[in-house]
């Protein structure tokens, strides 16, 4: 059952990711990105991270993607035009990228991780509850939490200022 | 087979990151380039959660929570910048916005 769910989510994530890169219209890419985020939420659930899975669905799949789709529709963004300006990226891009991914996969296969757990089995670790994360967040990570609230405030002010008036 | 090796999750994360890099390099629409960045951040989050599972420790979840928060803030500011660029330039093609190019 675990492997079936993992394979479904992984195939959906990779398929939607390919669709994101290959589609010409931004709205198709945005909808594929929602697919990637939903399948990642399923993978988080398989890894016992229930709080992060729900946060992923609400913050990414909900808020951030609605913002993206609003902007795409507000700007009436059409299909993008092809251009031949970046010749190096067009010729050498995909081979270099394939080398990068194969190298990463090889490193992951060969590394001996210094931990006892090497297999993922759904339900064998259920530490990622809201309670555990809340205790950690408001104990050990209290200062980063407060700093990040200031960051959010600055981001809101910056977004309002940028979107409000014309900047010459 | 009821157990999935941890390395499968990490490899899936590497593949997703690679696809994000491909979109970042190849696509010409500013919005799609921005969405590719979000895809890369998501791939990194999957790595954090996987290592968190492996060590039976909740720290990785906290990091991935912080990444989510920063990504949301970044999306708000970045989309406001895209709106401003479109208002001033009237284009979303990334190679027509080249006034900072040498």
Image: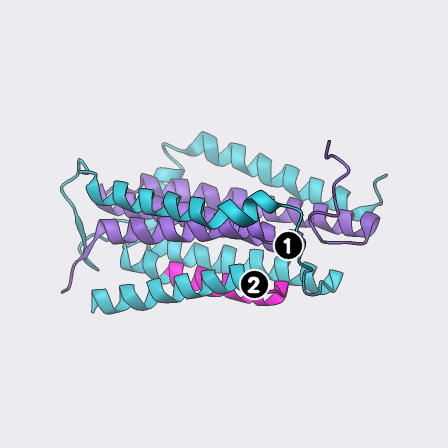
Chain colours: A cyan, B purple
Q: Nearer the viewer, residue B51 or A151?
A: B51
Magenta segment includes A137:
no
Q: Is B58 on the left-hand or right-hand side of B63?
A: left
- Expressed as whole percent of the image width and height from the top left, the position of residue B24 reads 55, 48
> Where B52 sits versus B39, above or below?
above
Magenta segment includes A39:
yes
Q: Residue at x 45, y 60 (%)?
A: A37
- Expressed as whole percent of the image width and height from the top left, the position of residue B17 reads 43, 48
Count of numbered circles on the image: 2
Residue A124, numbered circle: none
Q: Residue at x 38, y 43 (%)?
A: A100
Query: Which chain's residue wears label 2?
Result: A
Find residue B29 and report its image quarter.
bottom right
Query: Judging from the image, what secondary structure is the residue with disc 2 in?
Result: helix
The quarter of the rendered structure image containing the C terminus of chain B is top right
Query: Judging from the image, what secondary structure is the residue with disc 1 in?
Result: helix
Q: Is B60 on the left-hand or right-hand side of A112?
A: right
Residue at image mark 1: B31
Q: In this picture, which residue range is highlighted in magenta?
A: A23-41
- Expressed as whole percent of the image width and height from the top left, the position of residue A58 reads 49, 59
User: Decide: marks 1, 2 in contact (CB < 8 A)?
Assistant: yes
Q: CA distance from mark 1 to mark 2?
A: 9 Å
Residue A29, numbered circle: 2
Q: Main secondary structure of the magenta part?
A: helix
- Expressed as whole percent of the image width and height from the top left, the position of residue A71 reads 69, 59
Q: Residue at x 53, y 48 (%)?
A: A91
Query: Which chain's residue wears label 1?
Result: B
Q: Nearer the viewer, residue A69 or A18?
A: A18
The quarter of the rendered structure image containing the N terminus of chain B is bottom left
């Amino acid at each position: 059952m675990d492997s079936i769910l993992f394979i479904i989510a992984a195939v959906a994530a990779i398929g939607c990711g390919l669709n994101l890169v290959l589609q010409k219209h931004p709205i198709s890419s945005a909808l594929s990105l929602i697919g990637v985020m939903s399948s990642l939420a399923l993978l988080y659930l398989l890894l016992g991270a229930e709080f992060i899975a729900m946060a992923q669905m609400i913050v990414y799949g909900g808020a951030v993607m609605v913002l993206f789709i609003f902007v795409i529709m507000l700007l009436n963004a059409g299909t993008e035009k092809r251009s031949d300006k970046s010749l190096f990226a067009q010729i050498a891009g995909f081979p270099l990228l394939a080398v990068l991914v194969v190298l990463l996969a090889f490193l992951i296969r060969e590394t001996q991780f210094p931990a006892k757990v090497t297999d993922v089995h759904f339900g064998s670790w259920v530490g990622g509850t809201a309670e555990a994360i809340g205790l950690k967040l408001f104990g050990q990570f209290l200062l980063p939490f407060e700093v990040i609230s200031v960051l959010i405030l600055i981001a809101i002010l910056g977004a309002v200022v940028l979107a409000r008036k014309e900047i010459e | 087979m009821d157990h999935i090796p941890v390395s499968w999750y990490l490899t899936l994360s590497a593949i997703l990151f690679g696809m994000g890099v491909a979109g970042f390099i190849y696509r010409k629409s500013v919005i799609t380039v921005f969405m590719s960045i979000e895809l890369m951040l998501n791939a990194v989050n999957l790595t954090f959660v996987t290592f968190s599972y492996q060590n039976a420790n909740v720290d990785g979840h906290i990091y991935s929570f912080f990444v989510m928060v920063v990504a949301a803030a970044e999306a708000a500011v970045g989309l406001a910048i895209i709106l401003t660029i479109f208002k001033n330039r009237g284009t979303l093609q990334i190679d027509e916005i080249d006034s900072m190019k040498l």
